[in-house]
Amino acid sequence: MIDRRTFNAALLGAAASVGVAQAQQQTTTNQQSLRLIATEEAFTTPEQLAAMSKLGGTGPIKDPDLNSIRNKARALDVESPLTRTTRALLDIGEQRIADMDRAGVAMHVLSLTSPGVQMLDVPTAHEVARVSNDRLAEAVRKYPTRFAGLASFAPQDPAGAVKEIERSIRDLKLHGLVVNSHTNEEYLDLPKYWPILEAAEALDAALYIHPRNPPAAILPFLDMPDAGTQLSSAMWGFQLDTGLHAARLIVSGIFDRFPKLKIVLGHMGEGVPFWLFRMDQRYKMRNAGEGSRTGRKLQRLPSEYFKSNFLITTSGVFWDDSLKFCRDAIGADNIMFAIDYPYEESSQAARFMNAAPLPPAELRKVAYENAERVFHIRRS
Amino acid sequence: MIDRRTFNAALLGAAASVGVAQAQQQTTTNQQSLRLIATEEAFTTPEQLAAMSKLGGTGPIKDPDLNSIRNKARALDVESPLTRTTRALLDIGEQRIADMDRAGVAMHVLSLTSPGVQMLDVPTAHEVARVSNDRLAEAVRKYPTRFAGLASFAPQDPAGAVKEIERSIRDLKLHGLVVNSHTNEEYLDLPKYWPILEAAEALDAALYIHPRNPPAAILPFLDMPDAGTQLSSAMWGFQLDTGLHAARLIVSGIFDRFPKLKIVLGHMGEGVPFWLFRMDQRYKMRNAGEGSRTGRKLQRLPSEYFKSNFLITTSGVFWDDSLKFCRDAIGADNIMFAIDYPYEESSQAARFMNAAPLPPAELRKVAYENAERVFHIRRS
C-alpha cells in the first residue's frame, strides 16, 4: 500500500537505527538529578512520511502546518539531505537515547508526530498506524527502561480504530493512546467517536490529545501575512484548537458516560486551567438563573471533570509561574513532565523541571511518578 | 434615524432615571473596605436597544449572543416586562448607585454593552455611539465620584470613528474607549483601523477590548446542541475571539508603530497571560532557527508588548489562583478590578477583591490606583 521506493538510502538508514543494538541503556548521568519521564516526545516512521508526501496533489495545502510537513516529506524523494528535525523524529534508538542522556532524561513516552494519521484515507491511515505501532513496540521492547509508547489509531474509522487500540494495548503492550485534536474537523465528543472513548476507558489507556491546527474555516483568522510572525501552529493555533476540543469534551457530558476516561493535554493544559473558574461560574449561572438552555445537565461542574479526568503536561511551557498556577488550580497529581522533543530543547526542559518551585514530594510526582501511574510504566 | 416609537413607557421611564437627581453620592458604606473602582461595567441606552431590535429581519441570527440581545430588545416592543438585566443596563443613576453601595463599590467605569454599535449600518452606528456617549457624559457629570465612562465608536467607518473618539475624549471628557472585539469579522491590527489606534494613543485614551462571539465561520465549532451547556459567549467563545484579537495585535507589530497605545482586556487578560512564555519561546525559535517567515521582525518579544501595552481586569474571574498567577506573570501595575455588572454579582466580586492574597500596596493598585492612572480618574 505504501510505496517505499520513494525513499532514499539515507532515510532508510536513519529509520533502521531502531535496529542498532549497541545503544546504551544507562540511566541519567547526573545522579543528583530527578528521574525524568518526558511524556510528549515525537517520532515518525518512513511509512508516515511516505503517506504525508502524497497529500494534497501539487498545490499548497491550506493548513500551513500540513503544508510544511508534506513538503518536508516530499523533499526526501529528491535526495535532499534530511533536516535535523526529520532525522531526530526518525530515530527511536541510539541517537535519541544519547540526546536524552545529555539532558538527563530517563525516558521518552513516544507518540507518532502530529497530525498522526488523521488526514489520510482510511486504508492508508490504518496501515500507517499499524506499522508505526509495530515499530514503536519494537523500540520499547529493545529499550524498555528508556522508551514507552502511545499508540496511534485512525479515528476516521471508529470501528477499525477500536481494533487497533485493542491490539496496541493488549498485544503490543503500549502505554496509552495519542490523537491529534480534530479529525476531518470533528471532535471526539460526537457520538460516532464514543466507541473509541469506551475502548480507552475499558483498557485504562490514557488518551493524549496532541495539538494540530484548527479547521480550515478558522485558519484565515490566524493568517497574518504582514506580521512579525504567524499565529498558526504553536504560536496560537494549536492551543485554540486543542483547548476548544477539551472544552467540548468537558461540557458534552462524555465524562458522565465514561467516568474513568483519562485525557492528557500538553502545553500546561492548552489554556483550560486558566478558564476553570469562569466555566464553573457561567455554568452555575446558566443552570440556575434561566435553567439549562439544552434541557440536559452535567452531573458535575466543569472544573470537577477537569480535575478527575484530565492530566496536563509541561511540553513547551517551561515556566515556573505557570507550573505554580496549575498546581494550585488542579493539584500536583495531575501534572506530568514533557519536553516536546525534537521541537523543544531537552536541556532547557530538564533544567526547568529540576529547579521547579515545588515541594520535593510534588516534584517527584510531576517529574515521573504521575507518568508511571497514568501510563502503567514499571521500572525494571 | 432611530424610531423611538418602538419603546414603551416602562422603557423610557427606566432610561430617564439618569435624570433623577436625588441619588446619593455617598462613598462606600464600609469604611474598612478598599476603595473599589470597577472597570468593565455595562450599560445600554434606548437608542442601542432600538437599533438592536431591528437587526436581522425576522429569522434567527447565527450568533446566539446577538440573537438573544435582538430578541430581548424586540420583546420591549410588545409591552413585556423588562428583564432584570435590561432594567439594570438601562439605569445609570440611582438604582445602580444603590447596588454599588450595597456591594461597597465606589465607582463604575461604564461602557456601552457588547456588541456596542459594531453590527449596525454606518449611519445608525455613528448615531447610537454619539447619543450613548452623550448620555454617558451626562451621567458622569451628574455623579462624578461614582461614574466614569469609556466612549463607544463605530470602527466600521474609521474616519468617522476618529471624529467621535476625539469629541468624546476632548469635549465630553470621557475616560477611555471601548470596542467589542471584531468588527465585521476583522481585527484592529489591519491598516484600515490604524487611524483609530493612532487617535487613541495621541489622546492617551486606553482602549478596552470587550468580548463578543467569534466570526460566523467559527461559531459552528462552538455549537453543541446536545451538550450540558453551550460553548458560545462567556463559556468559551468570548475568550476565543478576544484572546485571538489580542494575539493578533501583539504579533502584528502595531505596538512598534504606536508604542504608547494602551489596550485593556477583561477576564484576567482573555487567556493571553497563560501563553506569554510559549509565545516568546516560539517567536525566538522561528526567528533564530529558520529566520522570520515573513521577513519582518518585531522590535520586542510578545511578552514585552503585553507588559508595556496591555492591562487586564478581573471581570468575571474572582479567583485567587488566577490573580496570583497574573500578578507573577505581568505585575500588579497591570491589573485592575472589574465586576462585569450586571452580568456578574457585585458582592461576590467585591468580597474577592477585599480578601485577595496580595500585599496591601499591590491590593490598592489593583483595587483603584491603576484605574485612576490609566483612565485619568481624579478623586474629588
Image: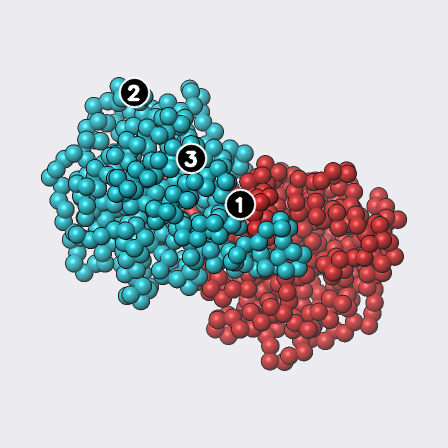
Chain colours: A red, B cyan
Marks 2 and 3 in Cβ contact (< 8 Å)? no
Marks counted in the figure total: 3
Q: What is the three-letter code of the residue carrying label 3?
A: Pro
Give the number of the mark in front: 2 or 1.
2
Is residue A29 visible to us here? yes
Give the number of the mark in front: 2 or 3.
3
Q: What is the three-letter code of the residue carrying label 2?
A: Asp
The picture places residue A332, in percent across and down from the top left corner, at 50, 65
Q: Residue at x 40, y 27 (%)?
A: B122
How crowded pointer 2 is (Cα within 10 Å; few <14, some 14-19, many 20+) is rated as few
Horizontal arrangement in the rendering, residue A59 relative to residue B219 (left or right): right
The picture places residue A229, in percent across and down from the top left corner, at 58, 50
Q: Residue at x 74, y 73 (%)?
A: A25
Q: CA distance from mark 2 to mark 3?
A: 25 Å
Closest to the observer, A121 or B293: B293
- Mark 3, secondary structure of its residue: helix
Give the number of the mark in front: 1 or 3.
3
Q: CA distance from mark 1 to mark 3?
A: 33 Å
- Find disc 2 in the rendering and name its residue: B3
Closest to the observer, B180 or A260: B180
Q: Residue at x 74, y 52 (%)?
A: A167
- Find disc 1 in the rendering and name its residue: A244
Horizontal arrangement in the rendering, residue A246 relative to residue B150 (left or right): right
Tell me if residue A18 comes above or below residue A35 in the rendering. Answer: above
Residue under mark 1: which chain is it in? A
Closest to the observer, B299 or A158: B299
